[in-house]
Amino acid sequence: MNDDKKSPTYNHTEIHHKIEASPKAPGIKAAFRFNHASSPWVRGISSGLSSSLPILIGILFGHLQYGLIASIGGFTYLYTKDEPYAQRAVKLFLALLGVTLCFTLGSLFADVEWMKTILFGVIGAVSVYIFGALKIPGPSAMFFVLSFAVSTSIPAPNLQAVFLHAGLVFLGGALSWCISMSGWLINPRGPETAAVAKAYRQLASFVGSLGTESFHAEQHKTVVELRAAETAMKQAKINRKKSSFSHRLFLLNQKAEGLFIFVMAAANDFNPAVSKKAQAVIETFASEMATLKKHKKIRDVREEIEELSIKEELRTLLLDVNDVLQMKELKETEYIQFSQGSVKARLKAAFHKRSYVLKNALRYGIIMIIAAAVAYTTDIPRSYWIPLTCAGVMLGATVRATVQRGIQRSVGTILGILIGTGILMLEPTGIVIALIVFVLQSTIEIVIVKNYALGTLFITPNALLIAESGHPDKAISYFTSARVIDIVIGSVIGVVGTVLVFKRASSLRLPYLLGDVIRKEGQFLEMLSTEQGEERIKQERNKLQGELVNLRALYDNVIGEYSKTAVKLEGLWPAVVATQQLGYMLLASYEGYELSETEKRELQETFAQLAAAAEQKRAPKLSSVPTLKRYPIIQGEITALYESLQVEI
């Protein structure tokens, strides 16, 4: 690699001195703040159909109770996200099996309280571990726990009835699987196309942030979206030789990675005017991609690109994207790919004694067992609402988020009970029940993105209607006061358990992860300076990139904790930013470095000292960083990291 390509003009102080302020955790008022997210109408209606159609079918066949049981399988739909249909088919089927298994276990052990107590914890812990290790967005353990909890209150006099009920849940889930997969008939490549378009939209924001305080935040978001797009391509089993449209998507994703690498390497060469013009072009690409169809041509912006006063390499990349959208043939270019690794590898990687995911899963399971034990030592009817409420509260991402969810869950659920009471007092029957469930479930999915408390306002009456409609002689007489007590107890256990057990979990871990990432960056830089196989470099790239994303996520957890340690660790924010910046620069280095043995030794000592300083929360014991005359950009990043660690925490 020639020197010009390795060492673009760069002055690290012009970027690193513009670090945005450390993000702040939202206060209690945020629990009742409305988000500006768009309403997912299609998801809402589809979710409503998944829950109400099984009830309607049961009514038409004269078995309302069977329809209500089958509707529990409809909660499978709630695990639908924006993943490609190939991946969605597998994920939802596994979720369907999980919901059915949990329901079956609840029916089998409905009268064995000690076993129910343990199973609440096991189901919660296993679900949280899998969702955490695989970084699957969604409701995590919630609906597996709900399926198990509700089944413990549905009479199943014999083994035959248990398997009949389980079969009904499976059929209800199978119907929701079909509803979720129906979009494949209209636009089979829709999700992965949307993922690539989203990556370009974020890439545009990143280009527009050059030289501003939001640069590092947008950089992190861009890597996350590039990872998501790459993962979507793999999940969709995109084969560039399979069809012209697949090849088109493959190239668009590849060019996005190339654009990110170039912008990272030449960040200091952009002036605000050029950045905004390039941003506008990339935003045009993103908008056009959002409606990309198999044989659709996209608006040609070649003239706009050629008029830009930008480097020729950037112009070529933008023209390449434009040509792909115009369905012109292009040669493929090898770029870094932001991969997450195989499912087996990610599950295995998260299973070790220092794993945050494993500790979080164990914490979740233990507190669920405590909640279930409290529930089954009281005389409150349907006391499974205690661990069920606890399960929802503890899904907050941080301690503060858990407290907020406790408040939201309590307020929203108590008000929801009043709505549920009113509905049950009307004694709805037949098709009216199916219609009410449809309206409630659809409303939940449409409004919960705005505010969690507002969503729980409709979750409770919906769950009550499904669980209690089969018991009209008892439902109104005793459930109102009992549910309020259950919800308060469950919320308190979830919040108190999280605060006591996990109050400083992220704070204690942050310095060590920061040091570990710095050490890995040194090792990766050294590896790039030696002869290594392409596959080995790719694997180490994936590991380092994953650790950089995890580092930022952990810092966000730290500021979400209630502890003096968390407040002090906000002083590490510049070091976190500098570490990410150095890491992403190294990831963008798709060719090796030529370092002398002296430079290698000096760098080894430097990274060892920087890592130790981060772990021990002190200033590095170095007078300066090594001089890398051939690679001033890397020297500048290391210097910025060294300067950011000149703090005592």
Image (cartoon, grey):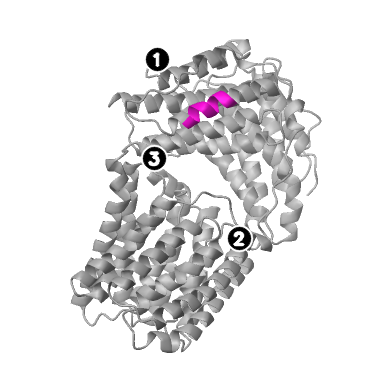
Q: Which stretch appears magenta? A: 280-287
Structural distance between the alpha carbons of marks 1 and 3: 25 Å
628 lies left or right of 414? right
- Which type of secondary structure does the marked residue at label 2 adopt? helix
Q: Is residue 635 left or right of residue 439?
A: right
Residue 141 visible somewhere in the drawing: no
Report which residue position mark 1 lands on: 331
For mark 3, give the secondary structure. Answer: helix
Q: In the image, is residue 140 above or below residue 18?
A: below
Quote the CA–CA distance across marks 3 and 2: 29 Å
- In the rendered image, the quadrant that contains the N terminus is top right
Q: In terms of secondary structure, where does tag 1 sit?
A: loop
Q: Position of residue 54 (x, y in %)?
A: 27, 65
Quick one: label 1 or label 3, which is nearer the N terminus?
3
User: Which residue corresponds to mark 2?
Assistant: 401
> Going 23% across and 72% down the picture, which residue do you hit?
59
Residue 42: percent from left, percent from top? 39, 51
Lateral position of residue 383 relative to residue 551, left or right: left
Q: Name the quadrant containing residue 597.
A: top right
Name the residue carrying label 3.
191
The rendered magenta stretch, by its main secondary structure, is classed as helix
Q: Residue at x 50, y 34 (%)?
A: 199
Answer whether residue 284 is magenta in the image. yes
- Of the numbered discs 2 and 1, the one sitting upstream in the chain is 1
Number of other residues with Cα within 10 Å of mark 1, as a class: few under 14, some 14 to 19, many 20 or more: few
Q: Amino acid at mark 1?
A: Lys
Instruction: Report the mark closest to the observer, 1 or 3.
Output: 3
Determine whether label 3 and label 2 are within 8 Å by CB.
Answer: no
- Distance from disc 2 to disc 1, alpha carbons, whole Å, reads 48 Å
